[in-house]
Amino acid sequence: SLIGGGAYPKPGEISMAYHGVLFLDEMVEFPKNVLQVLRQPLEDKVIHISRAIGAFTFPADFQLVGACNPCPCGYRGDPEKQCHCSESQVKRYQGKLSGPLLDRIDLHIEVNRVTFSELHGEGKEESSTVVRERVMAARAIQSKRYEDLGFSTNAALDRRYLDTFCALDSESAHIMEKVFQKLHLSARAHDRILKVARTIADLNGDADISGTHIMEAVQYRSLDRS
């Protein structure tokens, strides 16, 4: 149902989410072999299915959003409630999200428990309208930057264009090198950090990527850091 198939292949959820969002709640509860099948369509934006009657290709250009608990009980890292999971349980639980799959996910964000005051709307928050204006401005910058290349977002950048559009000065390059070595990053994770840093710079209206942008982008890959 996720990738499609059957005796006479039909598109699955990843194709039904074409140019949209596919949200997998409790992502680690999916069988590991199912999650691994997502790797190819996330990379190639299509899914290939072979059957006795022939080979089929369905579109699969979607944005993947997944959510899961940090451990089986859900309280690992909680400042108020103790986690009762063993290290082996946590490792087995998180192990369903393999390195190659995580490499294909741009952002890994830890979301803390909502407080009572936050739940009741106390304190000032940016409105969706304000956030939307900032996002649309960044999208306009990217669309103009890539207007002659056939795509319109930083996410679509491949390695051929990184040195051109994600160029680093000496300070930023030094930071990126330290991060790469300390976190033992793959080439794919390295490239995604650069593209996220490019997006952060666009959201700030900055023409060049700085060391600050790199460090912020690294903070958005918590599973690499852990």
Image (cartoon, grey):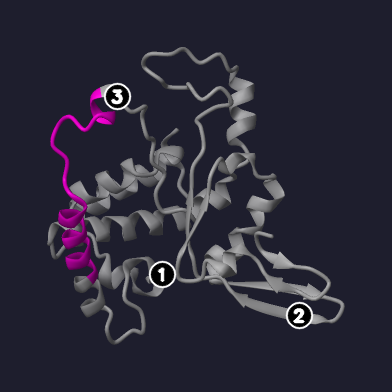
- The answer to whether marks 3 and 2 mark residues whose Cβ atoms lie closer than 8 Å is no
Q: Which residue is mark 2?
A: 55
Q: In the image, what residue type sits under mark 1?
A: Arg
Callout in the foreground (3, 2): 3
* Residue drawn where x is 31% and y is 76% of the image: 152
Instruction: Magenta stretch: give its range.
Output: 117-139
Q: Residues within 10 Å of mark 1 (few under 14, many from 20)?
A: few
The answer to whether one can see residue 220 in this image is yes
Residue 168 placed where, x, y %?
Answer: 23, 60
Callout in the foreground (3, 1): 3
Q: Residues within 10 Å of mark 2 (few under 14, many from 20)?
A: few
- The correct choice, above or below, for 84 with respect to 142 in the image is above
Q: Which mark is residue 33?
A: none
Tell me if 207 is positioned left or right of 187 in this view. Answer: left
Q: CA distance from mark 3 to mark 1?
A: 42 Å
Q: Earlier in the sequence, mark 1 or mark 2?
A: 2
Q: Earlier in the sequence, mark 3 or mark 2?
A: 2
Q: Which mark is residue 159?
A: 1
Q: Quadrant of residue 164?
A: bottom left
Q: Which residue is mark 3?
A: 115
- Majority secondary structure of magenta residues: helix
Q: In the image, what residue type sits under mark 2?
A: Ala
Q: CA distance from mark 1 to mark 2?
A: 29 Å
Secondary element at tag 1? helix
Farthest residue in the front direction?
120
Residue 129 magenta-drawn?
yes
